[in-house]
Amino acid sequence: MTISSYGGEPKHSIDSDHTRLHELGYKQELNRNLSVLSNFAFSFSIISVLTGVNTLYSTGLNFGGPVSLVYGWVIAGTFTMFVGLSMAEICSSYPTSGGLYYWSAKLAGQSWAPFASWITGWFNVVGQWAVSASVNFSLAQLIQVMVLLSTGGMNGGGYEASKYVVIAIHGGVLLSQAILNSLPISLLSFLGQIAAAWNIFGVFLLMILVPLVAKERASAKFVFTHFNTDNGVGIHSEVYIFVLGLLMSQYTLSGYDASANMTEETKNAAKNGPKGIILAIGISLIAGWCYILGITFVVTDIPYLLSPDNDAGGYAIAQMFYDAFKSRYGSGVGGIVCLGVIAVAIFFCGMSSLTSNSRMAYAFSRDGAMPFSAFWHKVNKQEVPINAVWASALIAFCMALTSLGSIVAFQAMTSIATIGLYIAYALPSFFRVTLARKSFVPGPFNLGRYGVVVGWISVSWVATISVLFSLPVRYPITDKTLNYTPVAVGGLLVLVVSSWIFGARHWFKGPITNIDHSSSGDA
């Protein structure tokens, strides 16, 4: 891994960033005000250990328990770092808000560029919308559980919100995040740094406080060696169970492409964009493993925590925190406060996700790939892509509306948040190690001779999880137990390819310059 510079000269100034962007075909329209810390903060806040782990902790408990949680995190995290390193190397060479789809276009070669750009861009932008939808829906569900526990719990006549109340909360959360994302990037950057600090603070507070308060704790042997095979869904193969337990880790470790999407607003982007990606993954790996270890010491009865008849309605983390404080103080209020810490982290995660969404939509529409592109890439006086912000919030809300018809339909929609997004992550790396193996010109951050090896490992891992997470998760298989992930992702693939064949191939030419060559002031 080396740090070099374009043309032998280091590029530290804003003018150099503008020049590099000009070389890539774009004029500077967004306010370049982000430091490496701010760039990192957006990706770190989207990965958000407190969001992903707490949302799918029940899945990890059910499929393998502590072994899947503790060791699955290490395995998924290690391979995620390979994916991130490969992306970081490409980001350094092409630091634009378009990120993944722009990289694919440049790496696939002139003849394949339009199609490579089209398929990568749509998987990326739809995957990001799905992330915003799933993250904010999980926050709405957590708020509902907090209200339930605050009013007595399932067994004490507590208030259980209807699905319409949950979707209304989801809409209110998205509305507030869209308002925040309408602020100038300097203010949003400050909020992003607060979000990163809150995530770190929350992780270490909860991993120490909750086990300390709990009167009953699991043994180290249980945490590091217990493998739960009693999942109640007809799956008995330990390998199969462990694979399904990986979903929590892989779902959490996504969204770090935000650092690439924010590069046109980042100083010294060719170095700081890649640093943002790697730092976000690396710090999340360490913080996440510590958090998983800490809270798993509170697990003493897995069937009880997963039971829909407990006070939290089967929300394992909520029940764990509630019981820990109730056993010590006779009241679960402290546990509800801890859930509030998680809720704030999830809110910040959704806010940062919407930021990344809007920049991706702005860039993709700038190249004419989206319907009504002229509307999507409008930038206001504060140099914020305001229409992309509000449109992305609206689409995320509409995706969550599927939960009103069927929670299965919503789960299928949000499965794109993991598999669909990772497919978009892998495509540029695939083109880099195949079509562009000899022509790729690295930027200041590069992996040297290991770049191709790392690229192949990342592509192979994404191909593997795409298959594994499409496997059935319950037997016997019926319309209510079918894993709709391959249906959702396959459906998206069919739509994207069909739209290309029957329309876009005639007019979409890939990334296009927006520089007026008749003037010299754009750079």
Image (cartoon, rainbow, N blue to C red):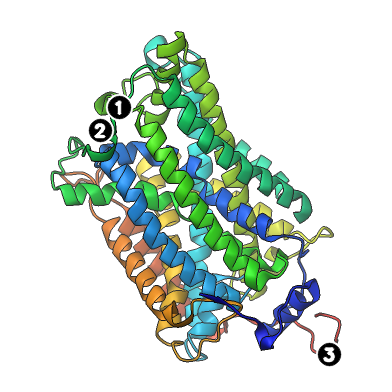
Residue annotated with mark 2: 222
- Which type of secondary structure does the marked residue at label 1 adopt? loop
Q: Earlier in the sequence, mark 2 or mark 3?
A: 2
**Quarter assignment of residue 271:** bottom right
Closest to the camera, between mark 1 and mark 3, is 1
Contact between labelled residues 3 and 2, with CB atoms less than 8 Å apart: no
Give the spatial CA distance, label 2 vs label 3. Answer: 70 Å
As rendered, which of 382 and 217 lies closer to the eye?
217
What residue is rendered at 19% in x and 39% in y? 233
Q: Amino acid at mark 1?
A: Ala
What residue is rendered at 67% in x and 48% in y? 192
Q: Amino acid at mark 3?
A: Ser
Which quadrant: the C terminus?
A: bottom right
Task: Determine if residue 477 is in view.
Answer: yes
Residue annotated with mark 3: 518
Left or right of 243 on screen, residue 138: right
Eyeballing the image, is 312 above or below 12? Answer: above
Left or right of 2 on screen, residue 233: left
**Image position, residue 261 (x, y; %):** 61, 64
- Which type of secondary structure does the marked residue at label 2 adopt? helix
Task: Determine if residue 257 is in view.
Answer: no
**Image position, residue 501 (x, y; %):** 44, 80
What residue is rendered at 33% in x and 55% in y? 75
Q: Amino acid at mark 2?
A: Phe
**Quarter assignment of residue 280:** bottom right
As rendered, which of 431 and 172 lies closer to the eye?
431
- Which type of secondary structure does the marked residue at label 3 adopt? loop
**Image position, residue 57 (x, y; %):** 37, 38
